[in-house]
Image (spheres, helix red, strand yellow):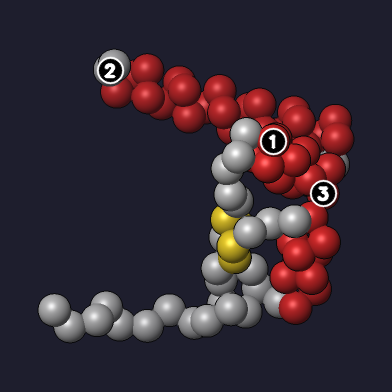
Amino acid sequence: MTEHDDLTDLYDRRYFEQRLKAALGTDRVAIVIVEIAAQAGMQTVAEGVEDAGALALLREYGVDYAQGFHIHRPGPLPED
């Protein structure tokens, strides 16, 4: 795969996500992704969880794991 293909693929995914969000709304997109993952036996991780409200919604949606400033602030890498 060439660099152009990688960039085109990234653009296509972003375009798809934008169209999906516009058609369904961001919340519905998240719910559908969680449902598809569950049906496929996969677990989900939400990134960028900034506040308690977002965490509560993610729990309601059935997200398995979350990370972000609300969970824990970034810290230094552990020593070897």
Mark 1–mark 3 distance (CA, rounded to whole Å) = 19 Å
Describe the element under mark 3 as helix, strand or loop: helix
What residue lies at 58% left-to-right and 49% top-to-bottom? 43
List the residue tagged with mark 1.
39
Give the quarter of the image for residue 15.
Answer: top right
- Amino acid at circle 1: Gln
Residue 38: quadrant of the picture: top right
Mark nearest the camera among 2 and 1 is 1
User: What residue does disc 3 label?
Assistant: 27
Q: Residue furthest left?
A: 80
Residue, x 60% and y 51% (percent of image)?
44
Instruction: Name the residue type under label 2.
Output: Thr
Mark 1 or mark 3, whichever is nearer to me: 1
Foreground mark, 2 or 3, reads 3
Using residue 3 as the reference point, say whether residue 74 is left or right of it. right
> Is the C-beta separation of discs 2 and 1 under 8 Å?
no
Q: Amino acid at mark 3?
A: Asp
Does dot 1 land on a helix, a strand or a loop? helix
Rendered location of residue 78, percent (x, y): 24, 81
Residue 33 visible in the displayed image: no
